Amino acid sequence: MDILSDLWLGAQTAFSVWNLLYCLLGVFLGTAIGVLPGLGPTATIAMLLPVTFGLPPETALIMLAGIFYGAQYGGSTTAILVNLPGESSSVVTALDGYQMARNGQAGTALATAAIGSFAAGTVATVLIAFFAPALSAVALTFGPHEYFSLMVLGLVASIVLASGSLLHAVGMVLFGLILGLIGTDVNTGEMRFTFGRFELADGISFVIVAMGVFGLGEILSNLEHEHTRSVSLAKVTGLMPTRADLKRMIAPVTRGTLIGSVLGILPGGGAMLASFAAYALEKKSSKTPERFGKGAIEGVAAPEAANNAGAQTSFIPMLTLGIPSNPVMALMIGALIMQGIQPGPSVIEEQPVLFWGLIVSMWVGNLMLLVLNLPLIGLWVKMISIPYGFLFPAIVAFCVIGVYSLNNATFDIWLMAGFGFAGYLLRKFDCEPAPLLLGFVLGPMLEEHLRRSMLVSRGDATTFLTRPISAILLLLAVLLVISILAPTIRKKREEAFTDED
């Protein structure tokens, strides 16, 4: 009965007028930025963080969450209609979705994506409601030793699951850890890595890093390739799938939901890895794999269900452990901290309105996506054709205003510009910036728990191995490193990410 009373509390929160409006605003913005190539949910949420200062915590998180999972749906629209994935997780959807559109089945493909996303989102919401409280109860028994080992495991997993070179991923995590240590040492009161700049005494705001690396960096990269973008719209007809279509999508949606629900929890994996894994499974298990890439409905249903399920279950480690599984969750943690809430297992007990309200709002948001987005296909189609030259000045202006509003300091704007140029260079050198943000967020917490553990053990480093849970987590991290160094596994990983590109 406890779960029912908790869900009733969440329903009262999620169905309040203001929360419904902000949920609608979130999924609408999410779909819009998913449709527009070059502006993902990470940069958008980073830009909107200053806006959430005056909102109640649950309202702010409901809107930001809507942007995240709304972007997963919006990215599929452009992938299907113009073969231009708005989100990295929609790359696989374009393989068969665009071919369906060319075959006169654009409406069916869009409906498949919507139904698959809604079904997966519903299942993922139920999983969060049932498993998150149990995981949170376990996490309440964690001490600094277990948290340190858990964060080590998370960083190792983000390296292993990052696309591209392992060496680049390691470098990005280390760079993020170093950035997170900039500021005043909480134990000694000494300023470190500040180069004598008093403005860095409190460290670098993650909003500045996120806006620079993901916002401005992405803009510079897109401007470089804007002249190569061409839009050829497919005609949208027949938005209602037939009974045969529905029958063919049931199994792929089920499998995609299960894969996405599991992989979404893993650090660095999330929606993108889930969509690729789901597509690969459908193709290998199909009796007619030759249909894939030529307009197979299974090739749309499975990855769309997977990326939406992955997007929502990635909230589990963020809400229960205070550990971000992707850059968006890192920003969510920042939003909570700005509201004076410390993410972790105590959130469920101390902030039940926020926790359960967010969970119920996820289902509400997915229903809004299903009901609103198919009738608004015409609007999304028009947005696709907007020249990027008209969009990027507005994006840059919004970034500047958002960063300046943090401390009313021009230094922050120059710092953001520097990170924007750094983000552009990272992309030029094929360095994925996501592990950088994870390292940046986890760095201070990692240091804090390491110091606490060493103080308790009087400097004995073996204490991490004498505590069972800590030892198991560190063992898993070591096994991950060993597995990825194995020639066979490493070769398969490189082949998978080569196919992705």
Image (spheres, helix red, strand yellow):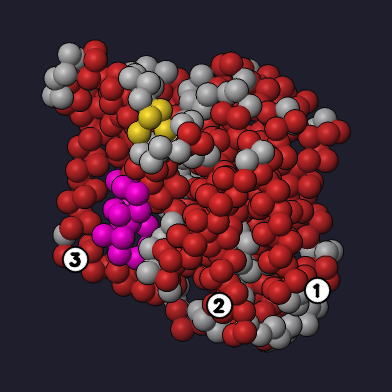
Q: Which residue is mark 2?
A: 224
Q: Earlier in the sequence, mark 2 or mark 1?
A: 2
Q: In this rendering, which labeled residue sits more in front, label 3 or label 1?
A: 1
Q: Within 10 Å of the Cα at label 2, are there few (<14), some (14-19), or many (20+) other Cα atoms?
A: few
- Residues at badges 2 and 1 in contact (C-beta under 8 Å)? no
Residue at 58%, 16% in the rendered image: 350
Q: Amino acid at mark 2?
A: Glu
Q: Is residue 117 visible?
A: no
Residue 475, horizontal then vertical, whole percent? 20, 37
User: In x, y percent, where is residue 319?
Assistant: 53, 31
Say which mark, if any, is on residue 488: 3
Report the side of 27 relative to 427 (left or right).
Answer: right
Q: Residue furthest front?
A: 196
Q: Is residue 392 left or right of residue 20?
A: left
- The mark that comes first in sequence, 3 or 1, is 1
Q: In the image, what residue occupies the spot 43% across and 66% down?
A: 425
Image side of residue 164 versus residue 68, left or right = left
Q: Circle 1 — which element?
A: helix
